[in-house]
Structures are given as structure tokens and as C-alpha cells.
Image (cartoon, rainbow, N blue to C red):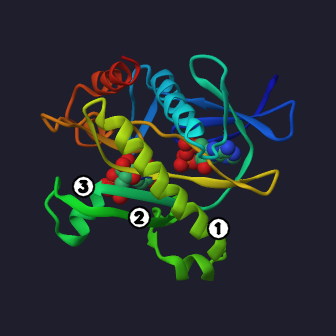
Amino acid sequence: MEKKEMIYEGKAKKVYSTDEDDKLVVEYKDDATAFDGQKKGQITDKGEMNAQISTIFFELLEEKGIPTHFIEKLNETDILVKKLDIILVEVVMRNIAAGSLAERIGLEEGTALPQPVLEFYYKDDELGDPMINRYHIYAEELATAEELDEISELAFEINDILVEFLAEKNIDLVDFKLEFGVGTDGKIYLGDEISPDTCRFWDSESGKKLDKDRFRRDLGEVEGAYQEIIKRLTE
Ligand code: ADP
Ligand code: UDP
């Protein structure tokens, strides 16, 4: 497998073509951003840590029958994936109120939700990823009703798998963001990453934040939080 030219550089990852048309290499970077890119920084060894953490989650999900883009981890920062046509709808799943949900509907951060909440956001940096509903998605032709049903069903299944797995590690899965795409075979796959950059992880006992909120909110011990997640996932 040959890693060829970089075809996209995002905020947290670089994407490369390969000598096979249907495969890409995703390289995880140490760069960290928050608040629509207004806050920028670096988290030492984040690229390596997130590649490792994402691999653990993708392997778990594959084992449980979820179709993902993951093929194999190539080295410390690089993961070989199926090339997807990314659906420009970010799916956020929530189990506990935090972040924008807590603010928007006036729930105290930490309030357990009686059932998981699924939200859609338009993946558009210039617009600041606004929250959208099904009808906006149809109006913008971002996805069909069938695709939305399929990704919603997958998102709830993924939530159940991750909540159960993380509970054994004494971690509460507060919320997380997923991206889906259509593969060259026309099927829907889970893409992108699952890491402390895209999830909120709280220690089940102390409630300590073990995710990118430590960077967003200047809480300190940022690297330590990512290391703690790796420690718990690999123990
Ligand atoms: P952003 O674009 O938000 O700055 P990243 O830095 O994470 O995000 O860049 C990675 C990009 O790669 C994202 O736009 C993501 O949608 C895209 N991507 C993730 N997985 C795949 C895949 N399997 N095929 C094609 N694109 C992908
Ligand atoms: N999230 C993400 N990328 C985004 C927006 C949100 O990975 O562009 C994740 C975020 O890490 C959190 C969840 O989605 O785990 C919910 O985020 P929220 O809507 O509360 O937004 P925030 O306040 O974090 O910007």
C-alpha cells in the first residue's frame, strides 16, 4: 500500500490518496481547534493517541457488526480506510446534557437524559456547522430519507455499544459526533474518527472530564486526559 499525495488537510487530520482507488490514508495531527477554529493549539502526541483510540473503537464496532471505513492501522498516526463520499450531516448522540445542548435548552450540565438524543448538524465550516432537521436535509439534498433512517439507526446502535464498553472502563459517554459516508460499493459506512476530540468522556465516579473540553475550557492536564483514556481502554 503506497501513501500518495495529500488530497485534503483538515483541522485535525490529513487525508492522502493511495495506489488503490477505493482506499485512503488518514493521518492524525497534533493540531487542536475549538469554537469553529477560533481557538487553535497543539496537544502533544494527540495524533498518535487519537489514531490509537479511534482504532480501538472502530475494531470494537466492526466486531459488533457495524460497517465502518476502518481497514487497518498502518503506523503511529496513519490509518488505512475505505474511501467514502462523506454525507455532509454530522450526527451528534447525547446521553447526558452538556455543551451546546445544556446551553440551548437550559439543562444543567450533567443532567442524565431519560433517553439518548440524536441531533443533525450541517457539516459546513463557513456556516459554523448549524443544527438542522430532516426537512432542511431534504431541502439541501444532503441525504435521502432512507439514508437518514439508516444512519440514525446505526447511530443508536453505536451509542449502545460504546456506552456499554465504556461503562466497564468507568467512563461515562456523555455525547459524541459521528460522520457517515457512501462507499464505492454504494453502501453506507461510519467514517471519520471516534476520539476525545469528538466525544465527551467523564470519569464515572469523579465526573472528571477526560476529553477535548480540557483544551476548549483551559482546564489543564489535556495530554494527561487523552493518556488516561488510552490507559483505561487498553488495560
Ligand atoms: P475537518 O474537515 O472538520 O477540519 P478533519 O481534520 O478531521 O476535519 O479532516 C478529515 C476529513 O476527512 C473530514 O472532512 C472528514 O469528513 C473526511 N473523512 C473522514 N473519513 C473519510 C473517508 N473514509 N473517506 C473520505 N473522507 C473522509
Ligand atoms: N463535536 C464534534 N465536532 C463538532 C461539533 C461537536 O466532534 O464540530 C462533538 C463534541 O466533541 C461533543 C459533541 O459533538 O462531544 C456535542 O458537541 P456540542 O454540540 O455540545 O458542541 P460544543 O459545545 O462542544 O461545541
Q: Quadrant of residue 20?
A: top right
Amino acid type shown at disc 3? Ala
Total numbered labels placed on residues in the image: 3
The image shows residue 216, relative to residue 29, as above or below, that is below
Question: SS of the residue at dot 1?
Answer: helix
Mark 2 surroundings: few (<14), some (14-19) or many (≥20) residues within 10 A:
some
Residue nearest the viewer, comparing 118 with 127? 118
Residue 223: where, in percent of width, then height? 32, 23
Is label 2 within 8 A of ligand 2 (CB to nearest ligand atom)? no
Left/right of residue 113 with respect to residue 33 in the rendered view? left
The image shows residue 186, relative to residue 18, as above or below, that is below
Q: Quadrant of residue 209?
A: top left
Question: SS of the residue at dot 2?
Answer: strand
Whether label 2 touches label 3, CB < 8 Å: no
Mark 3 surroundings: few (<14), some (14-19) or many (≥20) residues within 10 A:
some
Q: Residue at x 34, y 57 (%)?
A: 94
- The residue indicated by pointer 1 is 147
Alpha carbons under labels 2 and 3: distance apart: 14 Å
Q: Earlier in the sequence, mark 3 or mark 1?
A: 3
Is label 3 within 8 A of ligand 2 (CB to nearest ligand atom)? yes
Q: Residue at x 61, y 54 (%)?
A: 180
Mark 1 surroundings: few (<14), some (14-19) or many (≥20) residues within 10 A:
some
**Disc assigned to residue 98:** 3
- The residue indicated by pointer 2 is 118
Is residue 35 something that shows in the picture?
Answer: no
Amino acid type shown at disc 2? Leu
Residue nearest the viewer, comparing 150 with 229? 150
Question: SS of the residue at dot 3?
Answer: loop
Is residue 152 something that shows in the picture?
Answer: yes
Amino acid type shown at disc 1? Glu
**Disc assigned to residue 205:** none
